[in-house]
């Protein structure tokens, strides 16, 4: 009776780790960078949110784990390395195109009433 320990299987625990990383990074951005501590509570909040930098490290570790799992799982397939990079490029290209489509256009200041040369 063998077990099928496939790397691509969804691991729900990683969703929890990803959620913790998101909370850490958000706490860092919203608390630590927003206030200058003036009392004990604020000093404690800033000290705790300094751990938000660990959230970024968690994202890198998770990405490395997932990418390595994809490569290991597909290593016997023909052209696995090329296929992997084609999929990554497609994912990155779609993210870039979404960003470009949703980004506001820079406004030209020429011809506006308040423009100074």
Image (spheres, grey):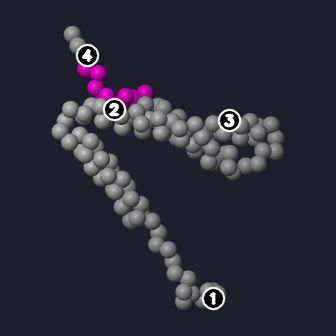
Q: Position of residue 4 (x, y in %)?
A: 25, 20
User: 5 above or below 90?
Assistant: above
Extreme residue in the right direction:
39
In the picture of the structure, the residue carrying the numbered disc 2 is 69
Q: CA distance from mark 4 to mark 1?
A: 72 Å
Can the viewer see residue 73? yes
Left or right, 65 with reference to 85: right
Disc nearer the start of the sequence (3/2): 3
First in sequence, mark 2 or 4: give its number.
4
First reached walking from the N terminus: tag 4 or tag 1:
4
Front: mark 3 or 4? 4
Q: In front: mark 3 or mark 2? A: 2
Crowding around mark 4 (Cα neighbors within 10 Å: few <14, some 14 to 19, many 20+) is few
Image-quadrant location for residue 72: top left
Measured in 3D between alpha carbons, the distance from the residue under mark 3 to the one under mark 2, in whole angstroms, is: 33 Å
Span colored in magenta: 4-13
Identify the residue under disc 3: 48
Q: Label 3 vs label 1: CA separation?
A: 48 Å
Q: CA distance from mark 1 to mark 2?
A: 57 Å
In this picture, residue 39 sits left or right of residue 87: right
**Residue at (30, 35) in percent of width and height:** 71
Q: Pointer 3 and pointer 2: residues touching (CB < 8 Å)?
A: no
Tag of residue 117: 1
The label shown at residue 35 is: none
Q: Secondary structure at mark 4?
A: loop
The answer to whether the residue labelled 1 contacts the one labelled 2, judged by CB atoms less than 8 Å apart, is no
Residue 101 in the image: state x and y as whole percent: 38, 65
The numbered mark, 3 or 1, whose residue comes first in the sequence reads 3
Q: Nearer the viewer, mark 3 or mark 1?
A: 1
């Amino acid at each position: 009776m063998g077990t099928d320990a496939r790397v691509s299987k969804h691991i729900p625990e990683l969703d929890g780790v990803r959620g913790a990383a998101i909370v850490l990074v958000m706490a860092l951005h919203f608390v630590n960078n927003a206030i200058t501590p003036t009392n004990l509570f604020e000093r404690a909040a800033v000290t705790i949110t300094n751990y938000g930098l660990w959230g970024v490290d968690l994202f890198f570790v998770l990405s490395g784990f997932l990418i390595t799992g994809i490569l290991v799982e597909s290593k016997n397939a023909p052209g696995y390395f090329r296929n992997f990079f084609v999929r990554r490029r497609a994912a990155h290209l779609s993210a870039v195109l979404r960003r470009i489509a949703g980004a506001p256009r820079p406004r030209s200041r020429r011809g506006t009433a308040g423009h100074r040369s």
